[in-house]
Image: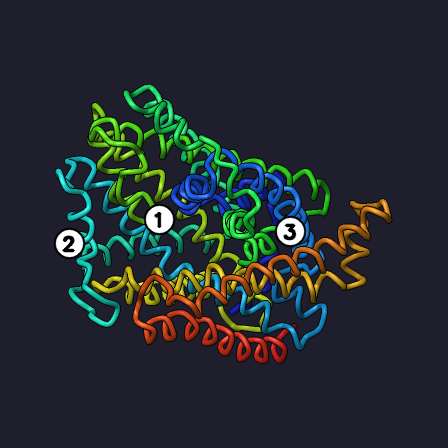
Amino acid sequence: MNSVKSDTNKWKKNTFFILAAIGGAVGLGNLWRFPYMVYENGGGAFFIPYIVCLLLVGLPLVIFEVSLGKWGDGSIVSSFHKKNKTTSWIGWWVLINSMVIVFYYAIVLSWSLEYVFFSASETWGNDPASFFTNEVISITSQPFQFGPFNFKALFALLAIWISVFYIVKAGTKRISRVLLVTVPIPFLMLIVLSIRALTSEGGFDGFNYFIKPDFSGIGNISVWAAAASQIILSLGLGMGQLVAYSSKRKDNKGTIKSSMSILGFDFLFSLLAGITVFSTLGVLANNQGVEVAELDNIQGIFLAFVSYPAAISQLPLAAIWGMIFFTMLVLLGLDSVFAVIEANLVGFEEMSMKFSKTRLSLIICSVGFIGGVFFLFGNGLYWLDIIDHWVAYYAILSIVVLQGIILGFSKSLQKFIGLFISNLRYLTIFKIWVSILIPLSLLVFIINEIIGEFSDVYGGYPLKAVIIGGWGVFFLAIIVSIFLGRLYNKKKI
């Protein structure tokens, strides 16, 4: 049987690489995390630190990771191995950490898929909050109370993973075809939803509430930390997907142009998502006779599965708008999931393993499916929240810091980047920026956040749950990564 290492398919056009990178970056977080971040951190004033961080943190890091893909000629593991094989484990930490994220991310997609069908008859009725917590997730009272198992979500989860398997097993050719549907269609859907919300009574009030500037917090370090972390999470940095996708480019032409395109589309989608969400909430607030600030459940997952269904029910032809919205969530999420799976596939392909790509894809997708089953119990949402806080914040920011410090000083990488940043002064600034200034800034944010963890237990959860689901998962991922790093060094061709 041939090793999957022999599969050397590349993107036929750079356009497909850009679409893949945008698809992997733009996801559910753009739709519910970004709008709330803007709302909670100064409204329109938040765009100042956000745009500054977008240009000074987002753009350099995207250029850096796109460069890593071609320089390392493979996965993020390959990049660390090329620098020094003793650091291969860090590359595996990137991939294992991203897989943990996908475990619960796919659960959210399974709920979205369920809601596509719920929308047809507005199954949530007059109380979307009660429907979501009692009927959909059957939430228990605390993390250590398992509660009932959600079999409906299990079948939806299986459908999600079968779709991902079908997409990734055939390589870039099939991924390219899928991207032509899953990237532009959600964008068009969002435009339609935003127009519908803005033209409804109360829509502009919600929009104005979203962008109303409050400059009082502009000097607060937490606001700048929020902007930087949102950009890193939104772009999928520190997850290995951009590196893997870039390694499949035919050449290194247009690196800066491609990076700016990825950045621009991600910001545009986030902005449009904010307009759509808060215009829709404005409709809901108008119908309830309250201000947007007085609405409940406008943060995180509850925004999508509680507030948005409630708002949609206020619109004519609610079933249609609901099906459009949740179909959009499914399409957005699929892109992000198969980006992570593709990144892991590239990593395992680099080992001398006697598996076809189809079998390896099946194994990884099966692991993803099994890893998500735990979150289908009634206490799943608690563990999802705890684990997400550690792996999608502390781990990813730590990884970005290590990438910059360890790989940024590689002389061969600097020489490679010098092919498209030919000016020596600009190249030196880029090196200092990515290798020293950004890592130091992120370290300040991480330390500031960790100090806060000692004063208040995250989310008011039992300390034992935070230790197990937070730091426990954080360090377990590192242990598994060290093992895979050693195995990789032995089997690397």
Q: Based on the displayed image, in which of its 4 quarters is residue 303 positioned? A: top left
- Amino acid at dot 3: Leu
Packing grade of label 2 (10 A; few <14, some 14-19, many >=20) is few
Rendered location of residue 135, percent (x, y): 15, 52
Of the two numbered discs 2 and 3 on the same chain, state the one appearing first in sequence.
Answer: 3
SS state under label 3: helix
SS state under label 2: helix
Which residue: 46% across, 64% down? 452
> Height in image: 20 above or below 282?
below
SS state under label 1: loop
The residue carrying mark 3 is 61
Residue 356 makes an appearance in the image: no
* Mark 2–mark 3 distance (CA, rounded to whole Å): 42 Å
The residue carrying mark 1 is 300
Please state, as top left, top right, bottom left or bottom right, where the C terminus lies in the image: bottom right
* Mark 3–mark 1 distance (CA, rounded to whole Å): 26 Å
- Amino acid at dot 1: Gly
- Amino acid at dot 2: Asn
Rendered location of residue 421, percent (x, y): 79, 46
* Mark 2–mark 1 distance (CA, rounded to whole Å): 18 Å
Determine contact: label 2, label 1, CB under 8 Å: no
> Height in image: 226 above or below 386?
above
Of the two numbered discs 2 and 1 on the same chain, state the one appearing first in sequence.
Answer: 2
Rendered location of residue 366, percent (x, y): 36, 65
